[in-house]
Image (spheres, grey):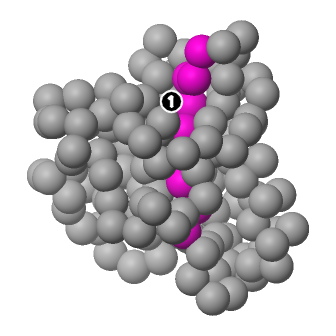
Amino acid sequence: MQILHISAADTLPVRQMALWPDHPMSASQVDGDDDALHFGGFVADQLICVASLFPEGDSIRLRKFATHPEFQGQGAGSLMVRHLLAEATARGHTLFWFDARETALPFYVRFGFETKGARFFKRDLPYVRMVKRL
């Protein structure tokens, strides 16, 4: 998989399909998208994985990390996480954080992320905050 910088608009179809398929594409947009760093994972010319980083001082926040459903479980997400961690480190950030669906916790723990705080809900789905010092 080749990982490239992409636009916020380029992320939307994969975000919507993987994260909120029963909602309009606009539900996959977030405040700050225009100023974030967006990455796309490509197999051949097909965009299969997207992730967005939002710098906040010494920390950086991951939002809207999604892999096309047909490509989930094949290593694309792992490659993307490694790339994002390297990108955050190269930019001098010392804390990497995000809100994760509880169903994805085992995936993130493999990369050294830890939960912080109590469970909360977004659109009736349980989430927890995850953090990693860089």
Query: Is 117 positioned to the left or the right of 39 in the image?
Result: left
Viewer-closest of 7 and 124: 7
Q: Answer above or below: position of 68 versus 130.
A: above
The residue carrying mark 1 is 67
Q: Amino acid at mark 1?
A: Thr
Residue 27: percent from left, percent from top: 21, 47
**Magenta residues, dominant SS class:** strand
Part of the protein shown in magenta: 46-54
Seen from the viewer's position, the closer of residues 80 and 118 is 80
In the figure, residue 57 lies in which quadrant? Answer: bottom right
Q: Residue at x 57, y 23 (%)?
A: 47
91 up-or-down from 113: above or below: below
**Magenta-drawn stretch contains 9:** no
Residue pictured at 73% horizontal, 38% vertical: 4
Q: Tell me the SS state at disc 1.
A: strand
In front of the other: 130 or 11: 11
Q: Quadrant of the C terminus?
A: bottom right
